[in-house]
Image (cartoon, rainbow, N blue to C red):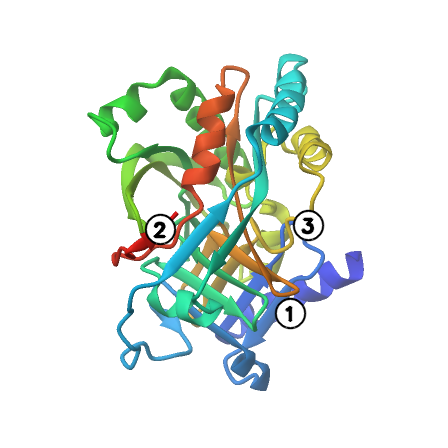
Amino acid sequence: MEDLKRNFAEKLNAWGKSKTPFVFLVDYRIEKPLAWTLDDENLGDIRFNLNGFGNRDDVDIEPLSDFQFHKFPVSFETYLARFDYVVSNLKAGNSFLVNLSLPTDITTNLSLAEIFDHSEAPYRFLYKDEFVCFSPEVFIKIKGNRISSFPMKGTIDGSVADAENVILSDSKEAAEHATIVDLIRNDLSMVAEKVWVEKYRYIDRIQTNDKTLLQVSSEIAGILPDDFDGKYGDLLLKMLPAGSITGAPKPSTLKIIEEAENYDRGYYTGVMGYFDGENFESAVMIRFIENQNGKLVFKSGGGITAQSNARNEYQELIDKVYLPFSHVPHIMF
């Protein structure tokens, strides 16, 4: 496994140094990292559009007709058992924040390719017929010697009265966000010489097929050292897995996640990204649908603190199971 990680890192380091454009995927456990240069014949098996950097033209996409999308979340009792285990560890001081995720069975008459085509998300990836991801969350951007990260933590239904003020004034959400910002500052400090918070707790609006979600983000930035020299592979291995989808402190929190979730995240909550020869950009792989032997599973989750309310967190997990379409279907359950 370590050889695989090292080979992946050295490949990206070499391409970065030579300014060779590439695209990559890293799974949550960093067990199956993948990378391609733009002349790789295997790029025909995948489709991506990462904030405008892509390998397919979207101009010929057929308009979307009415579609069906049904979600079948786990029972509250199933969720509560995992939630209680996480909270017991939080109260024992083993973590300050744990990102708990679970799979939700879904059915739809759309293919993964059609979901990719019509998703209104800045970061999209379709890997064969295995999974599609349509993420709103930046992991890191690098332009020149400036590196920045944009953790997204805190979600509310946009239809809630005065939703923006409600989410920004919620003490539990504020504490959770502060914890993640501090963690990302520490992570960036491992690769950058100077780190600061550029923008703190601003609102992103995300349109889904049935509602608008408000999500709270921050921007943390730093300056890369003079000897960085395009070592993108080394940088990723130092910073992954992403703090926004694990928690703090990372080592003990990763153990809690494994014991509480008891399922394989796979590429969900991993990272996807590209280097265009000058700029590097990546996104956290949230909003994720996986084809498991013909059955579709949507993986979602949220951050848990000792003050979290189980019913609210359960509802957030369900709310994050959506398609990012502006078109609303006539049939929706």
Amino acid type at circle 2 is Met
Secondary structure category for the residue under label 2:
strand
Q: Which of labels 1 and 3 is toward the front?
A: 3
Disc 2 or 1, which lies upstream in sequence? Answer: 1
Residue at the (46%, 69%) spot, across then down: 111
Residue 11 numbered mark, or none:
1
Badge 2 density bin: few <14, some 14–19, many ≥20, Cα 10 Å: few
Quadrant assignment, res 150: top left
Q: Position of residue 153 (x, y in %)?
A: 42, 34
Please tell me which residue lies in front, 190 or 262.
262
Task: Specify whether residue 218 is in view.
Answer: yes
Quadrant of the rendered image containing residue 277: bottom left
Residue situated in front as seen by the camera: 82 or 95: 82
Q: Secondary structure at mark 1?
A: helix
Question: Which disc is residue 101 wearing?
Answer: none
Q: Where is residue 190? Give x, y as percent.
A: 57, 41
Amino acid residing under circle 1: Lys
Mark before the other along the chain sequence, 3 or 2: 3
**Residue 79 occupies quadrant:** top right
Q: Which residue is mark 2?
A: 332
Q: Are marks 1 and 3 in contact (CB under 8 Å)?
A: no
> In the drawing, does residue 110 fall left or right of residue 291?
left
Q: Label 3 is placed on what type of residue?
A: Arg
Give the alpha-carbon distance from disc 1 to disc 3, as whole Å. 19 Å
Q: CA distance from mark 3 to mark 2?
A: 34 Å
Q: Residue placed at 35% from the left, 51% from the top?
A: 332
For mark 3, what is the residue?
Answer: 29
